[in-house]
Image: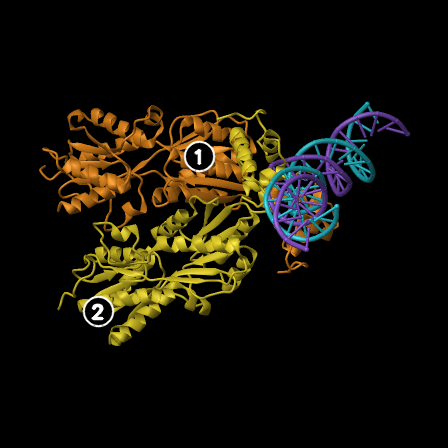
Chain colours: A yellow, B orange, C purple, D cyan
Amino acid sequence: MPRQSHPDRRVTIVDVARHAGVSTTAVSKVLRNAYGASPQMQTRVRTAIEELGYRPSAAARGMRGQTYTIGVLLPEIRNPFFADVLDGVTDRLNGSDYQLLMAQCCNDEAGEARLTDAMIDRSMDGLILIAPISSRRRLQTVARTVPTVVVGRHGNSPDYDTVTDDDFAGAGLVVAHLAELGHRHIAHIEHLERDPVRLVEMPNAQRADGYRHAMNAHGLADGIDVVSTTYTQEGGYLGARQLLARDVRPTAIFAGADIVAMGVLDALTEAGLSAPRDISLAGYDNTTFAAFGPISLTTVDQAGRQMGVNAARLLLDRIADRARPTAQVKLSPALVARRTTAAPAGR
Amino acid sequence: MPRQSHPDRRVTIVDVARHAGVSTTAVSKVLRNAYGASPQMQTRVRTAIEELGYRPSAAARGMRGQTYTIGVLLPEIRNPFFADVLDGVTDRLNGSDYQLLMAQCCNDEAGEARLTDAMIDRSMDGLILIAPISSRRRLQTVARTVPTVVVGRHGNSPDYDTVTDDDFAGAGLVVAHLAELGHRHIAHIEHLERDPVRLVEMPNAQRADGYRHAMNAHGLADGIDVVSTTYTQEGGYLGARQLLARDVRPTAIFAGADIVAMGVLDALTEAGLSAPRDISLAGYDNTTFAAFGPISLTTVDQAGRQMGVNAARLLLDRIADRARPTAQVKLSPALVARRTTAAPAGR
DNA sequence: AAACATTTGGAGAACGTTACCCACGCCGGT
DNA sequence: ACCGGCGTGGGTAACGTTCTCCAAATGTTT
């Protein structure tokens, strides 16, 4: 590991050029794998880079070209589903020249805007927005400024690519599973949504729609029972309390997300009930939590990793060609039946 | 929200200067709250900035001065304890000019080095390294290049500040709690550590030491029983299997981390046992998982949020004055007794 | 009134890299 | 011989900000 001659100053492209006896332009070309550098030149420059321990400054690069940095916006770091997506992105980006940096978002539109702006200000080459809550207008603005892929939000745009799970179908899988077990009164805890655009684009809305559609399709229209809270543990807890207070209790609860199902479990435990003995319970996301043995929650696997891989792929594609038409990747969810669902007690 | 005159080009400091009828130097001074700008100048420039919707380019800033970016290195995004630390950092940084960006680390030294390098390449103003595994030498090198705070690693350095939990004392709390309940054979699952430096600096090693020390102090030297695996769910599972196969089973298990305790619960469930009926179980970290009602794991609260707040504070201090002597903040852990610990069965 | 600080503003040179051009030499085909 | 094309290399001007001076105006002391 060679030390640089001057103790303080960073090694620059000029040092490399001098050391290799070539121009800075030549070094730059090699760095970017750009056209116009002969094989000899390549090895010569690379040797010099190695010998001096040179690493390009992203700041300087950002002023003219790329920074080889990709930003990921996460809404909630604690939700393991997002970690899965992130793993996929990381996988795809490994071995590329791109470095991934992420930021946790603050769960409000203003904060989301501030963060995307911060990423744009830092000359990032591309953005992956995971389950953003910003207005469609805002997303378009961002995407027109920097290559962007939106994950976990339906609807298509001419400006950004999307990667989603087929939430409508996923909800259907849960209903089918529970109906097959013999349940007729299957309640659903949804995330309250008023905004008309989000009512179409947000996964939670799609799941609620899918639930209603599937209930009707199975001839269980009478068993439709929806509680609107939020996709949080707290929301699940409160939702379950409402459901448990019904005159006629549902025999099964389909929570719109695993985190919601956790809140439901809380409420059940508190009420001295357990799943599936007293009530069947299903979630959505197949988080590590759901997979955890003592919990063993029936849920829907979104293949978060696959979503991440696709998002990264689409983003790299778009960085390479900003003009290509946008794509919408929709992945198929799969039911993971575990131990919180069973035939209803009275059957 | 005014649009910029040219459709494409970003608003620069030159535009602002022209619009305000001042020099770019003046604008720069206002942006940095630097000395030499009168109050009138300040308002005048700020108005122009507002009117044009100007935001400075971090890339350009990075070439001369600060980027107002702080990097956080997380070893494992799924561990909720790190999320707590991150919350604390975010809290402290909110309202400051600094933007936080994080990267997940790859759990090996090479990957950690690559990431810190990437952050340095991007001219970040400061780094917060959470539970890094790099060699001490490497940490020093990084810290000499950029202001750095190391979280969750003992030992002090003249180059970086540290924020830790008193892991030694924390382990003592667990042993005291279990001893008081009447346990005499208390096993511990530790993270295997060979490197002599890490054996002193890593929290896991401190916990194991604290465990041994406390066992002796309570006159339970005969009950010392340590299994070395890893701080993962898998490690907990394997460790518990070993312990359950003992001729004389321990009546309590102190897992070195909540994630390890989860693995233990897996193994217990598999063996048809439960805590605390058959065996008492304690973790460490007070993750959201431990707090979750149906789990209700006895654990140690590290006040991750406080650690994060302190780390951010120290980092901002150091950015302001790189010459100040380093500080070591050590926070006191607290026991959180929940439902997985009780008096041993045979008592 | 002169000398000296202090405050306020600006001019201009970095910072490290890449984009855009142009020059050179070497081909092959008129 | 001449011409166009291609492969190769380099010169140079950006990019947007801050930093280092310097000058003018204003205030303060002798």
**Where residue A113 sits: x, y (%)?**
52, 55
Q: Which residue is painted at 18% across and 43% down in the image?
A: B267
Disc 2 is placed on an element classified as helix
Q: Label 2 sits on what residue type?
A: Ala
In the rendered structure, the residue with mark 1 lies on which chain? Answer: B
Residues beneath discs 1 and 2 located on the same chain: no
* Left or right of B232, for residue B90: right
In the rendered structure, the residue with mark 2 lies on which chain? Answer: A
Split into 4 quadrants, where in the image is the N terminus of chain B?
Answer: bottom right
Badge 1 crowding class, 10 Å Cα cut-off, few under 14, some 14 to 19, many 20 or more, is some
Q: Which residue is painted at 46% across and 30% down in the image?
A: B161
Q: Are circles 1 and 2 on residues that touch, CB within 8 Å?
A: no
Q: Which residue is painted at 47% across and 57% down in the image?
A: A149
> Depth check: B136 or C25 in front?
C25
> Depth check: B22 or A301 in front?
A301
Q: Is residue B326 above or below residue B126?
A: above
**Where residue B141 sits: x, y (%)?**
48, 28
**Where residue A314 sits: x, y (%)?**
45, 56
The residue that label 2 is drawn on is: A179
Badge 2 crowding class, 10 Å Cα cut-off, few under 14, some 14 to 19, many 20 or more, is many
* Left or right of A124, for residue B173: left
> Depth check: A221 or A172 in front?
A172
**Quadrant of residue B130 within the rendered picture:** top left
Q: Is residue A49 above or below residue A104?
A: above
Nearer to us: label 1 or label 2: 1
Q: Is residue B39 above or below residue A220?
A: above
Task: Give the number of the disc on residue B113.
Answer: 1
Disc 1 is placed on an element classified as helix
